[in-house]
Amino acid sequence: MNEPFIIREILDKAKTIAVVGLSDREGRASYGVSRFMKSRGYRIVPVNPRIESSLGEKAYATLEEAAAGVGKIDLVNVFRLPHFIPEIVKDTIRLKIPYLWIQEGIIHEEAAREAEAAGVKVVMDRCILKDRMAAGWK
């Protein structure tokens, strides 16, 4: 987990990102990070049952609905409290999504180990935007 080569692999290979907990409000971290990632060519898929859309994209109530609606998802990027992580991990494994990024400040060691044991590559307690910036943009 959090190995530099995994971070780089995710940043290079993941093109469609399901953002669990993406808000439709500009002041939220999920919105700002996702907006910037979208501006750099990543496809952002909002997953939040409380909104209809964000960043011009239809929002889905669940990760399963998002996968059914958009097809292949490369990465699940999580902006939810730690107690939500185990269920998100179960969905990520079941849907065979290869990468899971749990945003900075969010930690659930047991769920992250479960994901890794199932073959999901995990980054936890890091900001995808900060890592993308540090890696440089193409």
Image: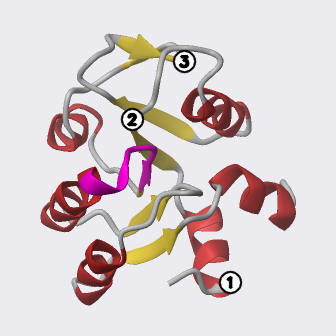
Tell me the kind of residue under disc 2.
Answer: Gly
**Sooner in the amino-acid sequence: mark 2 or mark 1:** 1
| Residue at x 15%, y 43% (from the top left corner) | 64
| Residue at x 71%, y 50% (from the top left corner) | 129
Residue wearing tag 1: 4
Above or below for 123 versus 17: below
Per the model, the C-alpha gap separating discs 1 and 3 is 29 Å
Asked if residue 78 is among those painted magenta in the image, a careful observer would answer yes
**Sooner in the amino-acid sequence: mark 1 or mark 3:** 1
Circle 1 crowding by C-alpha within 10 Å: few under 14, some 14–19, many from 20: few
Circle 3 crowding by C-alpha within 10 Å: few under 14, some 14–19, many from 20: some
Residue wearing tag 3: 55
User: For numbered disc 1, what is the local secondary structure?
Assistant: helix
Per the model, the C-alpha gap separating discs 3 and 2 is 13 Å
**Sooner in the amino-acid sequence: mark 3 or mark 2:** 2
Q: Give how far across and how far down residue 44 sits, in percent.
A: 49, 35
Above or below for 35 versus 97: above
Tell me the kind of residue under disc 3.
Answer: Leu
Tell me the kind of residue under disc 1.
Answer: Pro
Residue wearing tag 2: 21
Above or below for 137 versus 116: above
Residue 119 occupies quadrant: bottom left
Q: Which residues are magenta?
A: 76-83
Disc ID at residue 98 = none
User: For numbered disc 3, what is the local secondary structure?
Assistant: loop
- Whether label 2 touches label 1, CB < 8 Å: no
